[in-house]
Image: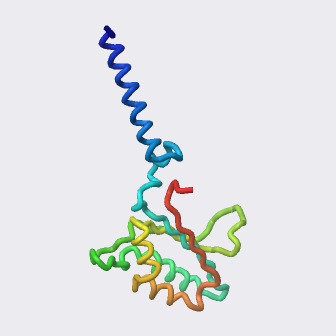
Amino acid sequence: MVAPGRQAVTLAIITILLLFTTILWKHPSGLLPAFSQQSSPDMSITHIVMFQFKAEVSPEVIKDVCSRMLALKDNCIHPTSQKPYIQAASGGQDNSPEGIQNGITHAFVVHFASADDRDYYVCKDPAHLAFVKSLDGIIEKAQAVDFIDGVY
């Protein structure tokens, strides 16, 4: 007969082995996808936008563009909920000492709950599309990079 303490340890080990076997069966590439948020289809999206303003653009116009960019957080309305859908927005003028900005002077970080929200923002949101159109003649260069945190 097995001692009660030893029986509990044996049962725990068998349970853990069964758990790992099940995970590896569903995720042959290893344990990381099973425990990672990478496998969730509704991960939040971080959208980074960087601008280089044309040399002749005044500081007042630059400030106005930056204010309007940040105001999109409240002005972009979800077509279904009829509420603002941008989770967070921040931005400002570059102050990096690295010297590798390649002309970029301002950067903005916008957070979306899902890729669907980001896609609506980029392709269909009337407030965002009007903002983009208003940049004609003001922006020398624009870059955008989007990512899901932890997805490499």
Instruction: State the residue in front, 151 or 57.
Output: 151
Does 7 sit left or right of 17 as displayed?
Answer: left
Instruction: State the residue in front, 101 or 14.
Output: 14
x and y, in percent, of residue 88 in the image: 41, 66
Q: Residue at x 40, y 25 (%)?
A: 13
Q: Quadrant of residue 10?
A: top left
Q: Residue furthest bottom?
A: 137
Quadrant placement of the C terminus: bottom right
x and y, in percent, of residue 3 in the image: 32, 9
Q: Residue at x 36, y 75 (%)?
A: 74
Does 101 sit left or right of 32 as displayed?
Answer: right
Instruction: State the residue in front, 17 or 69.
Output: 17
x and y, in percent, of residue 57 in the image: 61, 87
Q: Residue furthest left?
A: 81
Quadrant placement of the N terminus: top left
Q: Residue at x 49, y 42 (%)?
A: 31
Q: How is the image coloured?
A: rainbow
Q: Vertically, is 102 above or below 38? A: below
Instruction: State the residue in front, 96 or 136.
Output: 136
Q: Quadrant of residue 62?
A: bottom right
x and y, in percent, of residue 145 in the image: 56, 69
Q: Residue at x 36, y 25 (%)?
A: 12
Q: Vertically, is 7 above or below 139? A: above
Q: Vertically, is 45 above or below 1? A: below
